[in-house]
Amino acid sequence: MLEVKIIMNSVMEEILAFKCCSIPNQNLEIHVNNVGDHPVTVPGRFVLENENDSMDCSHLFPSWDQKILPGNGVAFYCSMDESDLDKYSTLTIFDREGNIYKFSTKEITSYSLPSE
């Protein structure tokens, strides 16, 4: 099971831009936590969706796969205008086993696989 927290205008934007990595404008922070009992590997990609449209976001940092052990989490960052995020109701994350996890963009949510 995964939990996601979406943070717009994150304080990490300044750290990534100036103190750490010289990556500017990373104002959207997404925490992905594994609250299940087996490791989950997720790529640096998500999709935003609403009833009429979708936007593939593959410009995340880090861009490589992240293996999340049970009880642990990772954070992804990207640049996104707040008005763009507000257009979408669902954030979809994928794992390398082919599972799809859908979360509301309006609140912290969790998702259980049918087998859990």
Image (spheres, rainbow, N blue to C red):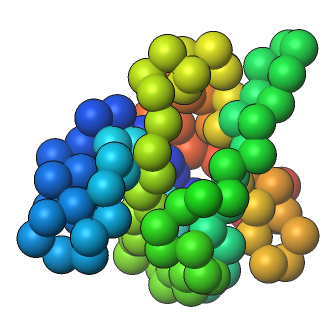
Q: What's the residue at 31%, 56% (across, down)?
A: 24
Is there any visible trace of residue 29 in the rendered image? no
Q: What's the residue at 56%, 44% (across, down)?
A: 110
Is there any visible trace of residue 63 in the rendered image? yes
Q: Is residue 33 above or below residue 93?
A: below
Q: Is residue 106 above or below residue 96?
A: above
Q: Is residue 51 left or right of residue 85?
A: right
Q: Is residue 58 above or below residue 105?
A: below
Q: Quadrant of the N terminus?
A: bottom right
Q: What's the residue at 62%, 82% (across, down)?
A: 65
Q: Quadrant of the C terminus?
A: bottom right
Percent across and percent down for residue 42 are 65, 72
Number of labelled discs?
Answer: 0
Percent across and percent down for residue 104 are 60, 28
Towards the viewer: 81 or 90: 81
Towards the viewer: 44 or 33: 44
- In the figure, residue 55 lies in which quadrant? top right
Q: What's the residue at 49%, 15% (across, down)?
A: 83
Towards the viewer: 28 or 3: 28
